[in-house]
Amino acid sequence: MKLFWFLLVCLCSSFSYAFELTDEEQEWINHNQNFMFYNDDYDSRLFFIEGEEKKGLYNYLIKDINKKLNTEFTIEVKDVDVLHKQFNNLETGAYFDFANTKERRANYFFVPTLYRVSTKVYFKDTLNIEDLVSLNNKKLGLIEDWYSTTNFVNKYSGKIAYIPVKFNSLNELVTALNAGEIDAFVADTQVITDKAYPTLDLPRLENLYTSFAISKDQVELHSILIKYFTELKSAEVKEMVKKSREDYFIYLFKKSKELNGLKVSAGYGFNDFPTSYLVNNEYHGIAPTLFDSIKLIFKDVVTFTEPTTGECIEFDILLSTFKSQCVTEKYFLTKPYYSFELSVFNKLEGNFISRIADVNYSTVGMLKNAYYYDYVKNNTLNVKMVFFDTFEEIIKAINDGRVDYAFGDQRLLLNHTINHDMYDLKTAGILTEKVSVYIAVKKEYKALFDAINLISISSDNERLIKNIYINENKKYKRNDLWLLIGILSTCLLIIALLLIRDYVAKKTKDRLLTMNESLIGSLEMASLYSDEETSEHNKRINIYSGYLSNLLGMPKAFVQDIQMIASLHDIGKIGIPHYILKKPGKLDPDEFNVMKQHVNIGYEIIKNTELSVITKNIVLYHHEKWNGKGYLNLIGEEIPIEARIVSIVDVYDALRQKRIYKEGFTHEVSIKIIEEERGVSFDPVITDLFLHYHEEFRAIFENNQ
């Protein structure tokens, strides 16, 4: 029977194609070939009008929908006040950019349109505005109809004593800020002005998802758009976002008299992966990719020389540089486009370090002209430095014992170890020193600096929605006979292999399960040896995780796996010094950096075992935060769901449990803290489920002491 269904799936996949509409949906399209979507002309990457031509991401989306559905949908532009009145009166239609709220869902369907934005505070006075507290008694510009304004007011009204000043448009906000009539304004990150203003992040506010709002009498259109986005490939999305962004900046900057006719020299500050590096005499990496976009944006305005590597003073624009490398009084530095904390590497059997002084009296490998040379030299004692041309040479030197440690970017180490199967190396520690890569522009080109800085910031602000619609499933055309024959042949071969595999698996399954259980038990004992307070904590983590996975409707195999292995989440703590684990007070920054290493240590311990991918994801990612500010900076749905599950129950139990450095909190206080961290530390969907069933989690804690 299983073989029958497998063959059926193979056959069905052969006949799937882009749009399989129901009769009702096709009938709707036949009668609505010229359907209109409504938007206002707010002048952003999402939508803008140049001359008579509509442009931006939404325009590309409608064109793509028309191409795939053979329709002639259009975007009709209306004044924002007229549009809001029409929307509030529940007039039939589909509307761009109306935020998805509980009240609106009573009358409208909402379909996300691939774009996620966050709310920020924009300002100019960097001396007097440093954080949210400094907004007290400051004039704050707000546009009443914007959802970002509602978001901000609901969260911070009464907590910050700002003075609200109302405006009708972005242009009014910018004019008022430049004239000093207001101190700052609130807007979301799709907003672009002709200058890159400093911003304050508002991490406690939920991200906004741009959406089609579709009146509920257009149910067929709603289902059609869902199918469209489901079939949309990620490569298509990226191309539309890239083109709309470049189109907008071309439109924005070609009007600039200050930029028109400029001729400037450009160069790379260094030859190093991943920022700019040579392959077959061609430059690759982040900086060359960014420069290609910059050249396209300024194609009719600014002329650039083709960049090579060199010192800051040789070029008007340096595309990859560090603060310590450039003559900063001659250059402006953009917002950093690549950053990392300086890491120390050594062999797997070598010592971990908690501070840079731990490498004293050792041999250290360094890149020639390394930008962190002075930092290492000034903070170590009796260190012998050996210099190398490439990172690959340093890795080999560590591997064969010529050097004890090396400094650099942890992502470089991961890249090289994976590509070269060098799994006997590890990160020995992460230091507090943060290294950032910038674009440097000579100060005589202030207008060009402002433009490039704006491009850099807008690129950083762009966040595509992941894992909602975008699939990479291959689709086969119905009339491709030879492809169908090939697929059937492949299916039959796979069936034969599966039969053989199933036979072998039945022989080994019980033995493997026993081995895994023994391994898990041994690892748990090792973990308890380093931190005996976690015994009952680990037991409860297993129970919580299984229960929460069930509530989420996860597959049975997933639930069984997670409730057996979630207790290994902190296995890496066996590599953390005892004085840190048992410290009664707050950890200092260096100690905390050492503590953070337990996720990497844990992963190193289990990565070559037969334990499941779920186990490895939990060990490595259970300290990630929904807002991207966890240990490894994964954000939102980039974090594996098993890690998101363990994260919330781990925090709940840690709050409840008495430790050497704190008393246990009550259930009520713990729940309040988790509620406040919804959308900050924790997945909002999982948090809502956890809060709804919070009494069950209380019972698990109290019954498993």
Image (tube, grey):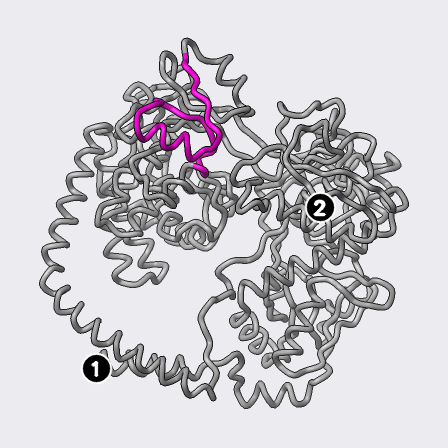
In whole angstroms, how far apart are the C-alphas of marks 1 and 2? Answer: 57 Å
How many residues crowd mark 1 within 10 Å: few (<14), some (14–19), many (20+)? few
Residue 506 appears in view? yes
Total numbered labels: 2
Give the x, y percent position of residue 169: 82, 52
The single residue placed furthest to the top in the displayed view is 382
Magenta highlight on residue 684: no
Q: Quadrant of the C terminus?
A: top left
How many residues crowd mark 2 within 10 Å: few (<14), some (14–19), many (20+)? many
At a point 46% along the width and 27% down the height, the residue shown is: 388
Residue picked out by circle 2: 455
Magenta highlight on residue 409: yes
Give the x, y percent position of residue 528: 20, 32
- Say left or right for 252 vs 496: right
Above or below, 287 against 134 in this view is below
- Say left or right for 647 vs 197: left
The single residue placed furthest to the right in the displayed view is 257
Q: Amino acid type of disc 2? A: Ile
Give the x, y percent position of residue 633: 48, 41
Residues in magenta, as a range = 383-412
- Say left or right for 615 vs 585: left
The answer to whether the residue labelled 1 contacts the one labelled 2, judged by CB atoms less than 8 Å apart, is no
Residue picked out by circle 1: 1
At a point 53% along the width and 28% down the height, the residue shown is: 434
Q: Amino acid type of disc 1? A: Met
